[in-house]
Image (tube, helix red, strand yellow):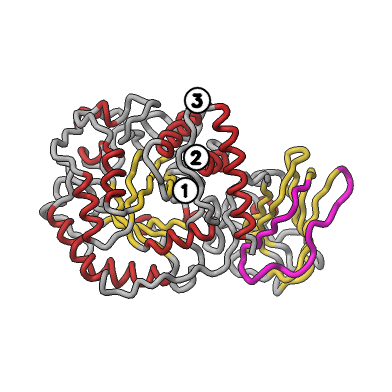
Amino acid sequence: MLQNTISSSLKLLAVLILAVSCSNSPQAPSIPASGKSLKELQQEFVDLRFGLFTHYGLPTYTTADWSDPLLSPEVMVAPDLDCAQWADAAVSAGMTFGCISVKHHNGFCIWDSKTTDYQILNSPIGRDILKEYCEAFAARGLKVMFHYSILDTHHKLRANLISKEKIRMIEEQLRELLTGYGPVTAIIFDGYEAPWGRLSYDDIHFWDLYRLIKSLQPDCLVMDMNSDKYPNEALFYTDIKFYEQGAGQKIDADANHLPSVACLPLQRTWFWKEDMPSSDQLRSAEEIVNEVLVPYGKAHCSFILNAAPNRDGKIDDNALARLKEIGEMWKAQDRTPVPLPEYEAPIVQENIARFRPSDSSWSDDMMIMDLANDDNFRTCWYSSPEVETPFWEVELDGTQTFNMIVITEGTAGGLKRYRLEYRKGSKWTTIFEGAAPGAERVKVHRFQPVSGEAVRIVFLEGTSAPVISEFGVYKP
């Protein structure tokens, strides 16, 4: 596979961007690369196995997890806030890392950000609690990760309202987070490409943010929580496949072969609510250990359990007791690392084929060619079974340079042999012809960059008429 080659390329890219960044910015990145490949970093992540998710902020003081975007920070009064207690709770549960929501969908920053007044120092707390959090977790040998919402209702980072200035704010916030708080194991994006978020990779280019993060901290993994959109056979727009269990994104522990992570709240919601200390039903230690940690660990999947601090800034006694109970049960389990199998490197570049004009040989009924590049992996173009040599092609936006094509079949699969070609002027040139690579329904072809105005696939052999869910062409 090309995993190590791609990892080396990413590290070279990080060095090049670092040089540019240092020459143009007075704030140089502070965390050097370890020299580890992406595959090694992914293996280390899944070997962590168990971490504490922390959601604390303005929604802690409301009845809803999505708080009013105009809610005043004055409600945040927490004289006993104690990040050391959170870290001790993670240790008692046998956890190896912490992940904190640094900015949720309401846009409130829990660190001292220079990009906005809507941040923790303008609350009665008046302290950079992210700094306290990172110091407390690092002191206990726990790695640190940040959950960051791209969707931001306070700053109107929503569909149809994105501007260059708003993108610069996101970039500067990421720069603050990755240069002011020590080593960060992962940045987890939320709100991207989700039906409820409605912010696309065209609105805010994922690849630009991916490059920025790798330039600032080359070992920082980048994750996107929108796992549900993409097939489970490949890493689309993420270094680690993410499953938000509470949103119905259930990992198949028997079939998964990708580095993955899943999450659930210990309590009923992500942020603390008033009835949690008394009447709230916590998940049992048996469920967390026997139904999640043990089977998921064998399936290359780490797990993040959320325990929400209360309005005093501390985790409730009932949650502390349950975390300790989980820790006692968890330490008795076999936690031997499971080596990751072979898999393709993440697909993180811009897809220049999506929504572009397409054509094909005769389609089957209404399943026409447009369904193969509509950015929806649940729809498909079906070739008519009466066509002897079917084809599908896409017209690019003028002459474009690209170095990767990804073919995602329908759920049944069936492709055995095909040819990939690109057109420049009136000439078609073959990129690949032969047997489909592997049995997976996601076929990834990487090659030296070429330039052309159109790309097509000609189907030569299969167990049935071709069915294509998505055909992607990616910029270098």
Which residue is identified by label 2? 216
Using a 10 Å C-alpha cutoff, classify the residue at mark 1 as few (fewer than 14 neighbours), some (14 to 19) or many (20 or more).
Answer: many
Q: Report x, y in % for residue 439.
A: 63, 71
Is any atom of residue 406 visible in this view? yes
Location of the N terminus by quadrant is: bottom right
**Could you tell which of marks 2 and 3 lies nearer the N-terminus?**
3
Q: Amino acid at mark 1?
A: Cys
Residue at (41, 70) in percent of width and height: 337
The answer to whether 385 appears left or right of 15 in the picture is right
Q: Magenta stretch?
A: 425-450
Q: Report x, y in % for residue 325.
A: 18, 66
Give me the C-alpha separation between circle 2 and circle 1.
Answer: 9 Å
Give me the C-alpha separation between circle 3 and circle 1.
Answer: 25 Å
Which residue is identified by label 1? 220
- Picture quadrant of residue 175: top left
Does the magenta portion include 90?
A: no
Using a 10 Å C-alpha cutoff, classify the residue at mark 2 as few (fewer than 14 neighbours), some (14 to 19) or many (20 or more).
Answer: many
Disc 2 to disc 3: CB gap under 8 Å: no
Q: Amino acid at mark 2?
A: Leu
Residue at (36, 29) in percent of width and height: 113
**Could you tell which of marks 3 and 1 lies nearer the N-terminus?**
3
The circle drawn on residue 165 is 3
Element carrying mark 3? helix
| Viewer-proximal residue among 286 and 391 | 286
The answer to whether 281 appears left or right of 140 in the picture is left
Q: Amino acid at mark 3?
A: Glu
The circle drawn on residue 40 is none
Residue at (33, 75) in percent of width and height: 334
The answer to whether 260 appears left or right of 164 in the picture is left
Disc 2 to disc 1: CB gap under 8 Å: yes
